[in-house]
Image (cartoon, rainbow, N blue to C red):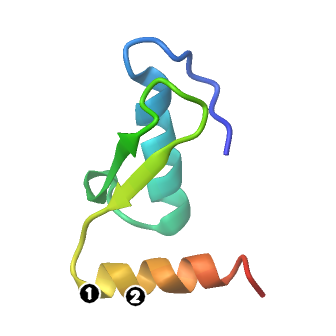
Amino acid sequence: MRVTEPPEGGKANRALVKLLAKAMQLPPSDLAVVGGLKDRNKVVAVDGDPTTINHLKSWLGAFHE
């Protein structure tokens, strides 16, 4: 994914979380960049109950079909 926010003060990371949350139909508070804070490659953690995790698995599965 690409975002247009500059990589200054965490703006790009916040924009990425917002974009992913919207795409996955999850609240942004369920997502956090936990790796690659200053790198182009990111690791994003998803927090949530089993319903959230099942929703995420379904969303990711759509890219493998």
| Residue 52, percent from left and from top | 33, 79
> Looking at the rendering, which quadrant does residue 26 occupy?
bottom left
| Residue 65, percent from left and from top | 78, 88
* Contact (Cβ within 8 Å) of mark 1 with mark 2: yes
Residue under circle 2?
Answer: 54
Look at label 2 and name its amino acid: Asn
Residue 5 higher or lower than 52, as above or below: above
Look at label 1 and name its amino acid: Pro
> Looking at the rendering, which quadrant does residue 2 occupy?
top right
Residue under circle 1?
Answer: 50
Residue 50 higher or lower than 28, as above or below: below
Question: Image point 49% across, 83% down: which residue?
Answer: 57
Name the one closer to the observer, 8 or 4. Answer: 8
Mark 2: secondary structure: helix
Position of residue 11 in the picture relative to residue 63 (left or right): left
> How far is disc 1 from disc 2 in space, using C-alphas?
6 Å
Mark 1: secondary structure: helix
Circle 2 Cα neighbour tier, 10 Å, few/some/many (<14 / 14–19 / ≥20): few
Residue 47 higher or lower than 31, as above or below: below
